[in-house]
Image (tube, rainbow, N blue to C red):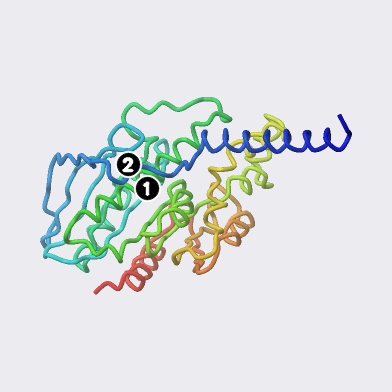
Amino acid sequence: MTQTLLAAISVALLLCCIIMAEAENREEHPSAFDYDPGAPLNVSVHATSERGDGVSVVDLDFASPRGGRVPAYLVVPPGKGPFAAIVYGHWINPKNSPQTSNRSEFLEEAIALAPVGVVSLLTDAPSVRHGFTEDPDPFSSQDSDVLAQQVVDMRRAVDLLESRRDVDPKRIAYVGHSVNAAVGGVLRAVEPRFRALVLMTSAVSMRLLLLSDEPRMVEFRNKYGERRVKQYLDKFDWADPGHYVSRAGGAPVLLQVATHDEFGNEANFRRQTEIVAEPKTVEWYDAKHALNARARRDRCEWLRQNLKLQ
């Protein structure tokens, strides 16, 4: 057998191995954020209350494509519409602030926006739902799996809104705080039905965060080793919101950032905002991670303009 033929066979085998490896990767993650939009939502309504000015708050849940139920509040203004709509994702911080660790965080904001023509859907994230158990291994797949589920559940939330006759499907926005802002970074790329997004106090790139000079990140790398941290980032690179929020052609995004954020320094948050693709508006606030009343006013005004509210 000639050397030329041997070389050709070697190249062919190498290409075959590469193709097989890529196929295996696609099989493992064909598209982590896809789901069956034709599956039934199976909405179950538990209670409805009136909150003045004809605004209704519906306590409901619907089926998650990844299993289980998604608890949510649906805030509905009076009238027939068609109304704009907002999907809200709360800050996940159950230990320090119970008011911001579930779907209640934005409830009063949603009620305040209803009279100007907004239907809002506020969901509980997977990690605060009944039966969730936190994996103590910081290098497990849990964070990536939960992020993927939350992205899919938020896409399903859009399906629920679009199923309503009183919602204008061309005026749907997303508001996410902290981890749910990172979820919004992915949604900007994979869910074109969101016409505007607000991302509040978020590290949109996990790689930038974990490899930053922030003391808690330096301590984390010193504890487990730089090599192990980088291996983890490479393994779950597909789930890093930084890849998605930096893609060109996304919907307009408002980034709300705190100068005294207890979960990161200003320099790191500036780097995070820089990777977000245009069109974007970046607003800084003299506040902590929870932000403040001025941020709420700015957010509502930005949504009013982008959703063409009354």
Q: In the displayed structure, would residue 103 be above or below residue 247? A: above
What amino acid does circle 1 point to? His
The residue under the point 47% across, 41% down is 32
Q: Which residue is mark 2?
A: 124
Disc 2, SS? loop
Q: Is residue 241 left or right of residue 83?
A: right
Q: Quadrant of the C terminus?
A: bottom left
Tell me the CA gap for discs 2 and 1.
7 Å
The residue under the point 31% across, 61% down is 172
The residue under the point 79% across, 38% down is 8
Badges 2 and 1: C-beta atoms under 8 Å apart?
yes
Rendered image quadrant of residue 162: bottom left
Disc 1, SS? loop
- On the image, the x and y values in percent for residue 278 come to 53, 68
Q: Which residue is mark 1?
A: 90
Farthest-out residue, right? 3
**Marking on residue 246:** none
What amino acid does circle 2 point to? Asp
Camera-side residue: 114 or 33? 33
